[in-house]
Amino acid sequence: MNKEFTTITERLDTVLEQLAYLTERQRKQEELIAELTPIAKLALGTATEKLDQLDQQGYFAFGKELVEVAKKVIEGFSPQDVHELGDAVVQILQAVRAMTQPAVLAVAADASSVMDDAAAVKPLGMFGMVRATRDDDVQKGMAIMIEVLRRIGHGANAVAEKSKQLEDKKAKLQLALGSRKQKKPLGIERKRLTAGTPAAPRPAPAAQASCAVPAGPQPSAAVIDGIAYTADGHLVDATAWTRRLGETLAQMQGVTLTDAHWAVLEAARADYETTAVSPNIRRLTQIANVTTKDLYALFPKAPGRTIAKIAGLPKPAGCL
Amino acid sequence: MKRIVILGAGTAGTAMANRLVRLLPEDEWQLILLDRDDVHLYQPGLLFLPFGMYRDDELTRSRTRTVDPRVDLRLTPIERVEPDTRRVVLGNGESVGYDFLILATGSRVVPELTPGLTGEGWRTSAHDFYTLEGARALRRAFETFTGGRIIINIAEMPIKCPVAPLELAFLADAYFTQRGLRDKVEIVYATPLEGPFTKPVCSSVLGNMFGNRNIQVAGDFNVAAVDGRARRISAYDGRELEYDLLVSVPVHNGAEVITKSGLGDAGGWIPTDKHTLTATRLPNTFVLGDATDLPSSKAGAVAHFQADVLTENLIAAIDDRPLPARFDGHANCFIETGHGKAMLIDFNYDTQPLPGKFPLPGLGPFTLLEETAINHWGKLAFKWIYWNVLLAGKELPLDHRMLMAGKRAV
């Protein structure tokens, strides 16, 4: 009996120990989260700032364009092309290095500077040409140009020869495997980009087309007589409103203002001053003490919007 | 012992209570949170319920479970608030005095304010989805719907979660497309506003979202009455639309107790300082969440950002310092667009929703004003965040102010 009791208490002790361990672990985890949250907040804040700088500097827009470029490269070239290009990269770099040696660049810069004083250079006739060849520098230049031409010609011949061999090989192969040519394409062929077709212009985001305005719920689209209006004809600044302006705005809405109209308009303006929200129909009936029917009789077309427009208040809006 | 009383254990009140109880010394401050029942509803989920994307039981939890045990949560109806004597009178006649009062009484739908809406056909051919019962009934109606015209009608502004009706339209389009019925279903969006999009950038960026989905729009449609028998909805300007299924977003008002206590305007919204969140006409009182009369959106994110501001200001008020924090009207929300995608918007009093990335400029992972799958995942993940982080009053690594970082001013 006593022994059993001891066993039970021992077990209980173990369970308690385990519970304590779990609680402690739980506490630690919660503490960690509590610790990390402000850190995450800070990190996020910093990251937001840094990324915003990059965004402002146009890195992301640039990156996006690079992706577009990569897309075109991928569509226009096969992996084999890229591989071959890889082999040629060293040669390309050598060529670029040779062309960008300071001495070469200086010659190029000097030569192109001719364009700056092109006006001073006189046109040259046949005899002028002959005369010019007496000049040592011109003779040297001509010799270099001819050497360049010779090497280009040599290179072009080599390329032509190589492609002719390739064509011959292909022709022999086709002769041998004549039937295969009739087979259906495998469907993995990539469409080649033809140099002549320009890429379709990317459509500008629709937003840019219709409103190039900075942030703000009420961008001004037009300024008439020193008063700014939004694109849909509401005042940008409700405080710029006067009774005379109200009359003009009413005329534009096809409404002839009576005392009954004015009572509603005044009530709407007073309400806007306290709430900063253009009143809806129900609110108008309450603040101006009229029925909805009255409102529609006074302002037949969309009374809420029409009243806001005439009273110089913003358009009743949702959050989109 | 001083006392802070919070009215309403919804999103705003619960988060605020859980936050304050950790900040205020227990031996100096008593924190009382009042609500009439023990059911906390995850309101963002109501949008998904009609489409069978959530189960009912995922959307409710006991308020007791969501509130820190150190908060004195009392579940009892509230009779009225007496600001002059600084006390709240409960339904059982007891009264609770306060040093500071936080009104987080929220908003409610009042379908009775639209003549005929709750008459014949209510919850069979005419529905709301802003209540659990309404969303459930709408699910049954959608499940058995085989074709005809669905009208989604906003009775009047303001409403809770102003994008929800748009989302419902998009999700309905996707839902009936997936069921292969879309060509038999006509969807009409009737709004008292000029159209579905009223801000310039949204209008131009999103303007064709309705046309692309073949959802028709009836703008400037101020509903005057519903005829449930003829299944017809009429506007004050004489327009009439017939429906087979009406999804109404009914008129919203503030809580009854606010109107009964004479603390609100005609709609029961409490006049509130736009930036400090103090009740403009009541001493030692702050307003939080949907209950305000502010032009900010009535949404959970707004309540969350306001709670950040209010915490700072309440502590300052306790210390008798000037109120330091200013609410800027910041709101953000996901907009479900169907087919596993969603948009995100982030805006405030002065800045309309703009395209860009959120929260990290250039990286996101969320994309503003654009439909992406990641945005949709964010919306889904938000449920866990709501129950475990937001309601618990824990800090989220987000600034309560709206930042321009990552946004493109178009």
Image: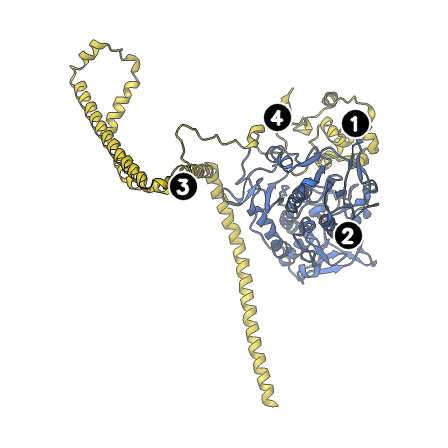
Chain colours: A yellow, B blue
Q: CA distance from mark 4 to mark 3?
A: 63 Å
Q: Chain of mark 3?
A: A
- Which residue lies under the disc numbered 1? A300
Residue A47 percent coordinates (x, y) = 48, 46
Q: CA distance from mark 4 to mark 1?
A: 26 Å
Residue A113 vs residue B306, the one in the foreground: A113
Q: Amino acid at mark 4?
A: Ala
For this orientation, the residue located farthest to the bottom is A1
- Please state which of the two labelled residues, at mark 4 or mark 2, is closer to the viewer: 4
- Which residue lies under the disc numbered 2? B86
In the rendered image, the quadrant that contains the N terminus of chain B is bottom right
Q: Chain of mark 1?
A: A
Report the side of B97 relative to A181 (left or right): right
* Marks 2,3: beta carbons within 8 A: no
Residue A162 percent coordinates (x, y) = 25, 35
Q: Amino acid at mark 3?
A: Lys
Report the side of A101 relative to B132 (left or right): left
Label 4 element class? loop
